[in-house]
Amino acid sequence: MTNKAIQKTTVKVLIPTPLQKYSGGEPSKELTAGNIIELIDALEQSCPGIKNRLCDEKGDLRRFINLYVNGEDIRFLDGDKTAVKGGDEVSIIAAVAGG
């Protein structure tokens, strides 16, 4: 049985305005990763402190954070194990509630 290696490629991450204080004001980052877990780790390396806003103390994505790969909600794909490939665009969207 062989393990299929995750191929790492460059992915564009769109960073929402409230989190841009971690990215030095940049609205996006080009990062190298093979899946969402790796992408969040790469984002933390590039933007220290951002992972705490995206993930809880166990490392799971926070309930109110939604990630989309090319417009597709990762909750309907493979969650945080969703593969990403070169040219993909990942959007970070914080859920908003109110009435």
Image (tube, rainbow, N blue to C red):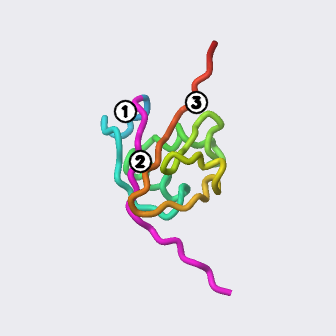
Q: Residues within 10 Å of mark 1 (few under 14, many from 20)?
A: some
Q: Earlier in the sequence, mark 3 or mark 1?
A: 1
Residue at 58% across, 58% down: 82
Q: Earlier in the sequence, mark 3 or mark 2?
A: 2
Q: Distance of mark 1 from mark 2, alpha carbons?
A: 15 Å
Write down the region rendered in magenta.
1-17
Q: Quadrant of the N terminus?
A: bottom right
Regarding mark 1 in the picture, which secondary structure is present there?
loop
Q: Is residue 63 left or right of residue 42?
A: right
Q: Total number of numbered labels?
A: 3
Residue at 35% across, 43% down: 28
Q: Which residue is disc 1 drawn over? A: 21
| Residue occupying the far top of the picture | 99
Q: Distance of mark 3 from mark 1, alpha carbons?
A: 19 Å
Cβ atoms under marks 3 and 2 closer than 8 Å: no
- Residue 86: give x, y in percent of width and height: 40, 63
Q: Residues within 10 Å of mark 2 (few under 14, many from 20)?
A: many
Q: Which residue is disc 2 drawn over? A: 13
Cβ atoms under marks 3 and 1 closer than 8 Å: no
Q: Up-down: is 81 above or below 15?
A: below
Q: Which residue is disc 3 drawn over? A: 95
- Residue 19: give x, y in percent of width and height: 43, 34
Residue depth check, mark 1 versus mark 2: number of the one nearer the observer = 2
Q: Earlier in the sequence, mark 1 or mark 2?
A: 2
Residue 5 among magenta residues: yes
Between residue 45 and residue 36, name the one nearer to us. 36
Between residue 69 and residue 48, name the one nearer to us. 69
Quadrant of the rendered image containing residue 56: top right
